[in-house]
């Protein structure tokens, strides 16, 4: 034991040959109270200094006879006084084991520790004592201080009077500092202490102290400074920026020490060697007892089990679970975990953001189709979503906008008039019926189109009404009560436009035989008919009527009498044959006649024959005789026009009182009178009732004739070309009437002759000389030649018409010669033919041999308007059918 008294100081001097070395790793000092002598007012402490050295650093072993300086200073003072040096030798030298399986120790690192133990007796009083050991040098490879290879170390402890008087024991570090720290692995090292008395201890990082150098001798720059020469306070080491005494290792997070617990935490992130100073202060009841400075070198290495940066991709709005930890945001994170080998490992997790992807599919289908969208079979419109994984592993949202369109159905009504052909969507229709087409509508779906087709003819018709029959007439909801010609445009049941010409005939009585001058009082007078002259009540604007007297046939042989007439007037009375066969009658008929003289451009129309007749039960002659009458039961009417019988009606019943008989003639063309036409009318009573009377008579009175005027040319004749030729192709249509010819050009393949005499015959024909060589080619020559040779005969009857270019009724080489000259331009026209031939449609049906088809259409007299005089155009020479149409009798 070394005893220190204020009176005697014993110095032991040892000659040491210092060795310059870079080997110091660290060191610390602790003390325990051995005894306290109140009489002598001293306390003896056992001091233990532990030094850590680098075995493989090439330096010296632990110093023998190491000198520990003891110094004192007064409270509040700054100057230290050397008291004495204590000499000690190393003991308990041993390697510090590195048994961490997670650390692969480099071959240049091996650390051992050794202890220097000695006793020191310190007096009570006021002074503070410091025990210090100075030695050079540190490892040259330290990274955080300047010139580590020439910088020494000082390990010290300060003991206050509070500790001396109370026989205090210093705090003892629980653990040896770790030789190796793992890079990028969080530190959680308990650098705390235990204290026998339970005093409080405060911890902090502090600046390690420096003393000594690489100079010879024993001064403060020598390898082993002499304690009596180098006194506290000792200089602090100089840290290499950015390192400081408080942040000696940097790190992320910064390596630091908890002031209350001594727990060192943080994560070193740079490999290297770092010197760290740890200062502890021991307090009791707020009074400082001990200040100890521990100095140690930490080696930061890459350790087994450590995972460096691990990069992850995090999808938008997603989460990432790594080792039971869930991450929802991009960033840098660390995790501590134990590897399979039991090693602590640190993962630096770097999570980078990724965007989710989205795609849109727009699809339209037609009901009842379905659309397969992944595992879904869809039939309804809507928006559907499917979340998949894209190539980056993120959500790939597929959005389907599905539109299900419905098929449509439409019904269209068409009226085809005058042989029209309906063309819809590439199909042609010419017959009545119901047809269906399956199309595609604007939505791309099926469109069922129903066509209801009616066929008909657009006609112009004429109807006659006489005001003699009624005071007014209603025709198609139109009321007429005055004479005239009226036109109605109608739509027939077939849907075709029709024109109705309404002729309202006047009830104008022009001629009357009233028999008022009847005179037959004597037999001689009964043979005389001179008094029965016609009376003209009105005149005609379109001509005159000259009527004869009314009389009995062979008047000189067939007498008449007079009797009381209709409405108390006089009438003529004639004898009757008993036979019921009018041709066998012996009594002659009552006759009269007239002749028409119309002005130019007009006709006189005979509308009505009206008379009154009576078959009385008793005869009553004006000469006074009267008696029973074997009266007739029938009459016959005959009308002759130009001596030809045009009307005959017999068995017309009689009446025993006056009866009105009226013939309506206006709808019969036989009663349309031209210049010089003569008419003769016969009225024959016959077939007596068969009573016993010997007298058989029949009375007639008030015989009237009614006429009207009519334009001569009032018949319409027209038609069209049944062809697919261009509408601007000009065709000439000719109307022949005798030697008179009327020509017109087609308009849009239609023609119309508006004024035609209904009493005349006409011939209609057509032709075209335009462009004879149009659509005529050598191919047509080949077809004709094959037909002539029998290799390939014509299959279409219109080919015969087209091939007979010289119109001789034959197909032979002469036709080929003419066609070649037309093709070569030698002939400007076909010499004996037209560029087009127009074949009447009716001619096709009249004979099966096309070469006998006529080019003419005969129109017979009549009042009916003809608007279906249709022709089929055949292009001369166009055997291949480029401009010719297909035509069948079904049309």
Image (cartoon, rainbow, N blue to C red):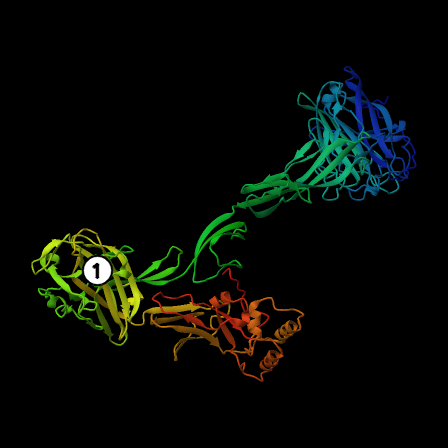
Residue at the extreme bottom of the image, as rendered = 826
Residue drawn at x 37%, y 62% is: 459
In this image, 660 relative to 114: left or right? left
Which quadrant of the figure contains the N terminus?
Answer: top right
Direction left: furthest residue? 624
Residue 359 screen position, x and y as percent: 61, 47
Q: Nearer the viewer, residue 382 or 110?
A: 382
Residue 147 appears left or right of 259: right
Q: Position of residue 15 (x, y in %)?
A: 92, 34
For the residue pair 886 and 138, the one nearer the viewer reads as 886
Residue located 88% across and 42% down the image:
216
Residue 600: x and y in percent read 26, 77
Given residues 855 and 622, the one toward you in this image is 622
- Out of 558 and 330, give the one closest to the viewer: 558
Quarter of the figure with residue 270? top right
Image quadrant assignment for residue 509: bottom left
Specify the farthest residue to the top: 39
User: In the displayed structure, would residue 806 be above or below residue 472?
Assistant: below
Residue highlighted by disc 1: 467
- Indicate whether 602 appears above or below 76: below
Q: Is residue 535 visible?
A: yes
The reply to whether residue 230 is visible in this rendering is no
Q: Position of residue 76 (x, y in %)?
A: 69, 30
- Is residue 189 rendered to the left or right of residue 758? right
Residue 426 shown left or right of residue 571 in the figure: right
Identify the secondary structure beneath mark 1. Answer: loop
């Amino acid at each position: 034991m070394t005893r220190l008294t204020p009176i005697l100081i014993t110095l032991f001097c040892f000659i040491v040959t210092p060795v310059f070395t870079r080997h110091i790793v660290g060191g610390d000092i602790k003390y325990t109270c051995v005894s306290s002598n109140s009489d002598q007012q001293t306390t003896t402490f056992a001091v233990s200094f532990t030094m850590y050295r680098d075995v493989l650093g090439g330096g010296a072993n632990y110093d023998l006879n190491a000198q520990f300086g003891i110094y004192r200073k007064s409270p509040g003072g700054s100057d230290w006084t050397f008291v004495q040096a204590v000499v000690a030798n190393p003991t308990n030298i041993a390697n510090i084991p590195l048994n961490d399986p997670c650390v692969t120790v480099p071959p240049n690192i091996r650390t051992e520790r050794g202890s220097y133990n000695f006793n020191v007796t310190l007096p009570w009083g006021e002074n503070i004592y410091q025990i210090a050991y100075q030695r050079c040098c540190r490892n040259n490879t330290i990274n955080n201080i300047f010139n580590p290879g020439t910088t020494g170390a000082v390990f010290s402890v300060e003991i206050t009077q509070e500790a001396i008087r109370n026989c205090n024991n210093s705090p003892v570090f629980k653990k040896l500092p770790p030789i190796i720290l793992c890079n990028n692995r969080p530190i959680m090292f308990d650098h705390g202490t235990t204290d026998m008395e339970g005093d409080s201890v405060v911890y902090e990082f502090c600046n390690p102290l420096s003393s000594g150098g690489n100079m010879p001798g024993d001064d403060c720059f020598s390898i082993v400074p002499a304690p009596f020469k180098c006194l506290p306070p000792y200089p602090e080491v100089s840290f290499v920026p950015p390192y400081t005494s408080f942040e000696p290792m940097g790190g992320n997070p910064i390596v630091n020490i908890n002031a209350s617990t001594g727990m060192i935490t943080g994560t070193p992130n740079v490999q290297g060697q770092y010197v760290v100073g740890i200062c502890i202060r021991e307090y009791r009841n707020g009074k400082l007892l001990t200040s100890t400075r521990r100095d140690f070198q930490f080696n930061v290495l890459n350790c087994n089990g450590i995972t460096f940066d691990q990069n992850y991709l995090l999808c938008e709005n997603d989460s990432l679970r790594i080792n039971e930890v869930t991450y929802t945001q991009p960033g840098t994170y660390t995790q501590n975990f134990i590897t399979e080998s039991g090693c602590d490992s640190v993962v630096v997790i770097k999570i980078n953001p990724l965007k989710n992807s989205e795609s849109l599919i727009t699809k339209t289908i037609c009901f009842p189709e379905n659309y397969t969208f992944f595992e879904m079979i869809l039939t309804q419109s809507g928006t559907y979503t499917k979340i998949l994984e894209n190539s980056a592993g993120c959500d790939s949202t597929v959005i389907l906008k599905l539109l299900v369109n419905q098929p449509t159905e439409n019904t269209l009504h068409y009226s085809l008039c005058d042989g029209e052909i309906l063309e819809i969507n590439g199909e042609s229709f010419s017959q009545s019926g119901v047809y269906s087409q399956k199309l595609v509508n604007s939505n791309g779906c099926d469109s069922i189109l129903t066509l209801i087709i009616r066929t008909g003819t657009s006609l112009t018709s004429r109807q006659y009404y006489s005001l003699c029959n009624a005071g007014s007439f209603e025709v198609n909801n139109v009321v007429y009560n005055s004479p005239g010609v009226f036109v109605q445009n109608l739509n027939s049941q077939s849907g075709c436009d029709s024109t109705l010409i309404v002729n309202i005939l006047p009830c104008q009585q022009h001629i009357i035989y009233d028999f008022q001058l009847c005179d037959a009082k004597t037999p001689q007078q009964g043979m005389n008919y001179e008094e029965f002259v016609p009376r003209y009540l009105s005149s005609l604007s379109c001509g005159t009527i000259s009527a004869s007297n009314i009389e009995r046939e062979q008047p000189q042989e067939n007498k008449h009498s007079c009797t009381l007439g209709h409405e108390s007037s006089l009438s003529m009375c004639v004898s009757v044959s008993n036979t019921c066969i009018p041709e066998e009658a012996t009594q002659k008929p009552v006759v009269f006649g007239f002749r028409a003289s119309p002005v130019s451009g007009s006709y006189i129309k005979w509308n009505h024959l009206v008379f009154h007749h009576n078959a009385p039960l008793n005869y009553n002659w004006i000469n006074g005789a009267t008696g029973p009458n074997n009266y007739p039961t029938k009459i016959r009417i005959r009308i002759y026009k130009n001596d030809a019988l045009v009307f005959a009606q017999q068995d017309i019943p009689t009446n025993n009182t006056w009866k009105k008989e009226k013939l309506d003639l206006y709808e019969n063309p036989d009663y349309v009178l031209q210049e010089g036409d003569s008419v003769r009318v016969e009225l024959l009573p016959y077939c007596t009732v068969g009573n016993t009377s010997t007298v058989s008579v029949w009375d007639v009175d008030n015989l009237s004739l009614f006429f009207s005027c009519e334009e001569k040319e009032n018949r319409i004749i027209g038609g069209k070309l049944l062809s697919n030729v261009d509408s601007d192709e000009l065709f000439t249509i000719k109307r022949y009437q005798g030697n008179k010819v009327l020509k017109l050009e087609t308009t849009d393949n239609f023609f119309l002759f508006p004024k035609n005499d209904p009493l005349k015959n006409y011939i209609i024909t057509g032709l075209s000389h335009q462009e004879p060589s149009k659509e005529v080619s050598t191919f047509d020559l080949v077809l004709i030649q094959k037909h002539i040779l029998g290799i390939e005969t014509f299959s279409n009857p219109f080919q015969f018409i087209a091939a007979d270019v010289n119109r001789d009724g034959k197909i032979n080489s002469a036709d080929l010669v003419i066609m070649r000259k037309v093709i070569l331009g030698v002939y400007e026209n076909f010499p004996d033919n037209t560029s087009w031939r127009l074949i009447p449609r009716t001619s096709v049906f009249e004979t099966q041999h096309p070469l006998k088809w006529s080019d003419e259409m005969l129109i017979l007299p009549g009042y009916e308007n003809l608007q279906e005089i249709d022709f089929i155009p055949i292009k001369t020479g166009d055997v291949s059918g480029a401009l010719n149409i297909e035509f069948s009798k079904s049309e």
